[in-house]
Amino acid sequence: MKLSEIKLALQKLKTIGFQLPDGSMVPAHFHVTEVGKVTKNFIDCGGTVRKEEVVNFQLWNEEDYDHRLHPEKLIDIIELSEKILEITDAEIEVEYQGSTIEKYGLDFNGVHFLLVNKATDCLAKDNCGIPEQKPKVRIAAKQNACTPGGGCC
C-alpha cells in the first residue's frame, strides 16, 4: 500500500484498526510513534547497485487506554512528515513489536489495515547463478491404461 492510498482510506474511516497476519487485532489503544522515510542503498548479489525507499510507520501500544489515534490525526502526522521529511508516495512498511521488532507490508480490506508478512527474495536471479525453476508437469493417466495387477503389461 502506498502513502496516497492510506490517506484516502483514512478519510473514509471513523476508527483505525490494524489486523495482524494471524487475524488478531493490534490493541485499539496503539499509537503511531513514528512516520519516517527509510532509504536503503545496497548492491545485490549480481553486483547491481540499488536504492529502495519506503515510508515507515511504527506502531506501539502501552497501558494508555484513554487515548486513541483517530484517522484525522494520523492524516495530519502523515502530511507533516511528507512536508518536513520530503516523503514521496512510496510503499508503506509497518514495524510492530512481536517477539522482536517485526516488519510488515500494508494492505486494506475496507474496514481494517492488514499487516502483511514480508519475505526476502533474490533481486538478481538472472545474474547470480541461481538456475531457473522448470515448471512442474502433471502426467494424467489414460482411461485405458494398465493398472498394477491388471495383467496387460
Image: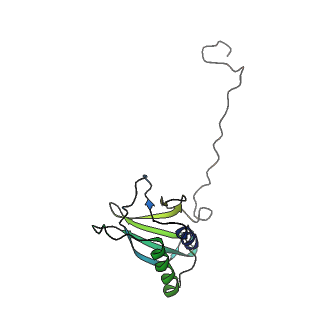
Coloring scheme used: rainbow
Residue 9 in the image: state x and y as whole percent: 55, 67
Q: How many marks?
A: 0
- Residue drawn at x 41%, y 76% as measured from the top left: 34
Residue beneath the point at 48% across and 66% down = 14
Classify the position of the N terminus by image quarter. bottom right
Q: Which quadrant, please, contains the C terminus?
A: top right
> Which is more toward the observer, 113 or 150?
113
User: Could you tell me residue 22's position as x and y percent?
Assistant: 42, 52
Q: Which residue extends farthest bottom?
A: 84
* On screen, residue 153 above or below 32: above
Q: Nearer the viewer, residue 50 or 131?
A: 50
State the image coordinates of residue 121 (x, y, percent, origin top left): 53, 61
| Relative vertical location of residue 130 with respect to residue 39 in this rendering, above or below | above
Q: Quadrant of residue 94?
A: bottom left
| Residue positioned most to the front | 14
Viewer-closest of 72 and 27: 72
Furthest-top residue in this view: 151
Q: Is residue 7 left or right of residue 19?
A: right
At a point 48% along the width and 84% down the height, the residue shown is: 80
- Position of residue 16 relative to residue 139, above or below, is below
x and y, in percent, of residue 31 in the image: 37, 71
